[in-house]
Amino acid sequence: MMTLSSSASARLWLLVSILLSGYLLAAQNNTSRLVVTVGTASSGPFGGQSGLSCFAIYSDGEAFTFALSSEGVGSKDASGKVIHSEKQESRVYRFPEKDLWRIEGFADFLDSKAVRGLKAYYPPPHRPIDFVETTVVNWSPVKGQPKGMQVREYYVASLDEKAKYPSALIVLMDSIDQFETIVTEKGTPGAENPGCRLPEALSK
């Protein structure tokens, strides 16, 4: 069974804190409403391999992604220390006006009774062996207080395992994945945003 190292655990919980504080900051500083922000931290399947990513989307169609990953195969420096190369990328994209109905519909879904009934934590669908992943989702319903949820290893769950999840969770996560894919494929390199930002400390 694979477990997170102390440094990886610290990075994970720092990610959770940063996402929450960044979410509130962006909600205060942006004239449009921050619909949802998602952060994922992973470790494995190879030793030294890890990843951090973030996604945020606003009601006006503006969206951001940020990803930081390290390779599993490292190389030794002059002192003999193994160094794992890292890759960092951020993208920005504005959904055209004709597609804003998709964001509006998603925001309405976040206000639904089904989503309000989701748990704050969903454990791993199976015992982690060589890969650990935690996804943190924060959203702000039009009515009510901001909500948050943590899901373990969702993206590597089998179809049979996903069948045990509430349908609202599946729709929520798959919708987020679709939005993020569009931003990644159609977006352009851009600066980080308060609603989707991982500080330098997370890469250490």
Image (spheres, helix red, strand yellow):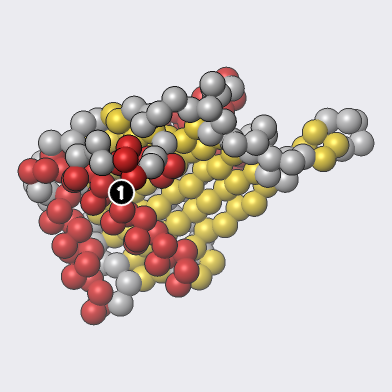
- Please name the amino acid that badge 1 sits on: Met
Q: How many labels does the image show?
A: 1
Q: Mark 1 points at which residue?
A: 173
- Seen from the viewer's position, the closer of residues 167 and 195 is 167
Q: Position of residue 98 (x, y in %)?
A: 23, 79
Q: In this view, does 84 lie above or below 186?
A: above
For residue 92, what is the image quadrant?
bottom left
Quarter of the picture containing the N terminus is: top right
Badge 1 local density, few (<14 within 10 Å), some, or many (20+)? Answer: some
What residue is rendered at 53% in x and 27% in y?
Answer: 129
Q: Where is residue 7 in the image (x, y as percent from the top left)?
A: 59, 25
What residue is rendered at 26% in x and 41% in y?
Answer: 163
- Seen from the viewer's position, the closer of residues 50 and 2 is 2
For residue 33, what is the image quadrant?
bottom left
Q: Where is residue 159 in the image (x, y as percent from the top left)?
A: 34, 45
- Seen from the viewer's position, the closer of residues 192 and 183 is 183
Q: Is residue 124 above or below residue 19?
A: above
Residue 39 visible in the picture: no
Residue 189 visible in the picture: yes
Q: Residue furthest right?
A: 78
Q: Position of residue 54 (x, y in %)?
A: 44, 48
What residue is rendered at 20% in x and 58% in y?
Answer: 106
**138 displayed left or right of 106:** right
What residue is rendered at 37% in x and 50% in y?
Answer: 195
**112 displayed left or right of 120:** left
**43 displayed left or right of 140:** right
Quarter of the picture containing the C terminus is: top right
Q: For mark 1, give the secondary structure.
A: helix
